[in-house]
Image: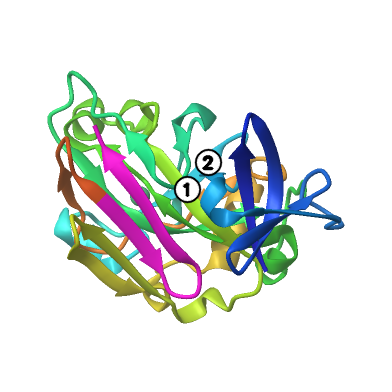
């Protein structure tokens, strides 16, 4: 099932994508999913970020080849940072290039959307707390990230977290192709089977220190090939079995 969040004429709702229409849900898709029977044409709605997270929890350096491209040492355990909820934008959204920005990079990543409040989840139980899977672009002001030493500012600008286009709830995420294209040119092309830390290990590590809430998103790290964007660019993150998340840089 593909779960989305839509806006039309000022009304917002969660919905299920059914071909070229979206069927509206009653309330949120956490717990029981209740369809209303009302549907709108997909072409007439604005797709919003499919999740409205209280926080986006990200994993750094989780693909060997990406760690190598920055000559980084591999972490002994997952390296975690947060992006604020105000960084989140939806499909076809605009990444605003900071006025004092000098190098703004794309980072295509597999996102996990949390389906229920959880803490202390064991690695083998990770799937029970995950509603489904989506695409994330962990947009990064690289020069500020390295200058600051810690990553809050470089990763946390408003609009620096495109999410979407929807949440795929039925998918085996263990070996999916993940690709990022800049103005149509392939820049990142890898597979989720190359993750250093497994999804279970990541969920266990994160929920050992913080409570995850329904709608929270985990960005699981980016493969090699990250690079800069400039104003006017279009960037697409595509994950096999999920879809394409497209953003525009302004
Ligand atoms: Mg990243």
Q: Which residues are magenta?
A: 235-250
Report the magenta stretch's main SS.
strand
Residue 12, percent from left and from top? 67, 36
Crowding near pointer 1: few (<14 within 10 Å), some, many (20+)?
many
Front disc: 2 or 1: 1
Residue drawn where x is 52% and y is 59% of the image = 134
Residue 163, numbered circle: 1
Residue drawn where x is 58% and y is 64% of the image = 20
The answer to which image quadrant residue 215 occupies is top right
Spatial CA span between label 2 and label 1: 10 Å
Left or right side of 201 for 222: left
Residue drawn where x is 29% and y is 29% of the image = 96
User: 69 or 215, which lies in front?
Assistant: 215
Q: Is residue 110 visible?
A: yes
User: 157 or 26, which lies in front?
Assistant: 26
Do the residues under discs 2 and 1 have CB atoms within 8 angstroms? yes
Q: Is residue 52 visible?
A: no
User: 220 or 198, which lies in front?
Assistant: 220
> Which residue does the numbered mark 2 point to in the structure image?
56
Residue 8, percent from left and from top? 61, 38
Q: Quadrant of the N terminus?
A: bottom right
Residue drawn where x is 24% and y is 48% of the image = 234
Left or right side of 200 for 234: left
Residue 41, numbered circle: none
| 201 lies above or below 227 | below
């Amino acid at each position: 099932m593909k779960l989305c969040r839509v806006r039309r004429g000022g009304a917002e709702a969660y919905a299920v994508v059914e071909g070229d229409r979206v069927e509206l849900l009653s309330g949120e898709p956490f717990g029981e999913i209740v369809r209303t029977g009302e549907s709108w044409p997909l072409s007439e709605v604005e797709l919003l970020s499919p999740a409205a997270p209280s926080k986006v929890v990200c994993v750094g350096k989780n693909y060997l080849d990406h760690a190598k491209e920055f000559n980084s040492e591999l972490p002994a355990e997952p390296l975690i940072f947060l992006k604020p909820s105000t960084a989140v934008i939806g499909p076809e959204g605009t990444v605003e290039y900071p006025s004092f920005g000098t190098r703004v990079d794309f980072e295509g990543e597999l996102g996990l959307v949390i389906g229920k409040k959880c803490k202390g989840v064991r690695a083998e139980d990770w799937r029970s707390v995950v509603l489904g899977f989506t695409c994330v672009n962990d947009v990064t002001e690289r020069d500020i990230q390295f200058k600051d030493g810690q990553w809050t500012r470089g990763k946390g600008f408003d609009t620096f977290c495109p999410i979407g286009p929807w949440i795929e709830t039925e998918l085996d995420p263990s070996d999916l192709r993940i690709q990022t294209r800049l103005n149509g040119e392939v820049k990142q092309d890898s597979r989720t089977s190359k993750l250093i830390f497994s999804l279970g290990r990541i969920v266990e590590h994160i929920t050992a220190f913080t409570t995850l809430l329904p709608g929270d998103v985990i960005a699981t790290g980016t493969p090699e090939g990250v690079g800069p964007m400039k104003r006017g660019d279009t960037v697409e993150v595509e994950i096999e079995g999920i879809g394409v998340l497209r953003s525009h840089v302004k």
